[in-house]
Amino acid sequence: MKPVLNRLGQRGVAILVILVSLLATGGWYLLWYTPAQSEIRALEEEISRLELQAERGRRAQRALPQLEATIQDLEAQRAEFLQKLPPRERFADVLEALSSRAAETGVTVRGLARSLGEVPVEGVRTINLTLELESPFPELFVFLREIERMRRFSTINGLTLSLGQERTRNPTLNANLSMTVYVFERAAEAEVER
């Protein structure tokens, strides 16, 4: 190798060293530096993403006691609400209350039909009622107001009115009232007491 370097001379050796250095630098840049920079950028993005997730987790952890307190409060409100509903076994009391309110307000109950509805909330059963009523408008209005006061336990779904046979100043109205009454299922009682 010395004879080849001697033939090149000092200038040729310098050029050869510069070329080899440039090739080595280019190889280092292309084969190590550029992939390393790409990997560094990818790792920095991953770090940013993980830091964001960690911050979300810390915020969620800080909010957890408040969320648990809210859940307990809502469960207590649900239990209180369910306990205020009449139990299904005492549905006859609900019907008695409706008929006594009708009698107190001067409304005549001509017919009653009932059917079981769905279970909108665990522990609560809906019972659909259809009442056939007869009375003048003022008494019917007072009766409806009385039912509205029961709104925590019932909802009025529909009311149809028709005029009776008589044509007086305050005629008797025939009304069909559809309503849903909410009752407490005994099977869920043990769960509410827990």
Image: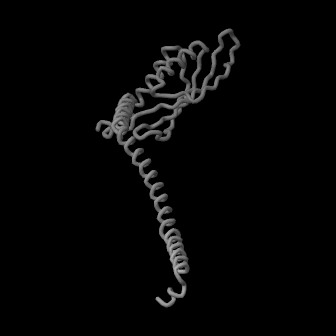
Q: Residue at x 40, y 45 (%)?
A: 55
Q: Based on the displayed image, in which of its 4 quarters is residue 67 positioned?
A: top left
> Which residue is depicted at the point 40% across and 39% down?
123
Picture coordinates of residue 75 (x, y %)? 36, 35
Residue 132 % position (x, y): 57, 26
In the rendered image, the residue lying farthest to the right is 167
Look at the picture and state if 120 lies above or below 106.
below
For image coordinates 44% across by 37% down, the residue present is 125
Residue 138 higher or lower than 185, as above or below = above
Residue nearest the observer in this picture, 51 or 69: 51
Quadrant hosting residue 86: top left
Type of colouring: one colour
Toward the top, the furthest residue is 169
Q: Quadrant of residue 164?
A: top right
Quarter of the figure that contains the C terminus: top left
For the question of whether residue 89 can be seen, the reply is no
Return the x and y of residue 167 as percentages of the image width and height.
Answer: 70, 13
**Which residue is more in the foreground, 159 or 48?**
48
Q: Left or right: where does residue 172 sit relative to residue 89?
A: right
Residue 7 image point, x, y percent:
54, 88
Whether 54 is drawn above or below 74: the answer is below
Q: Relative to residue 6, is residue 20 depicted above or below?
A: above
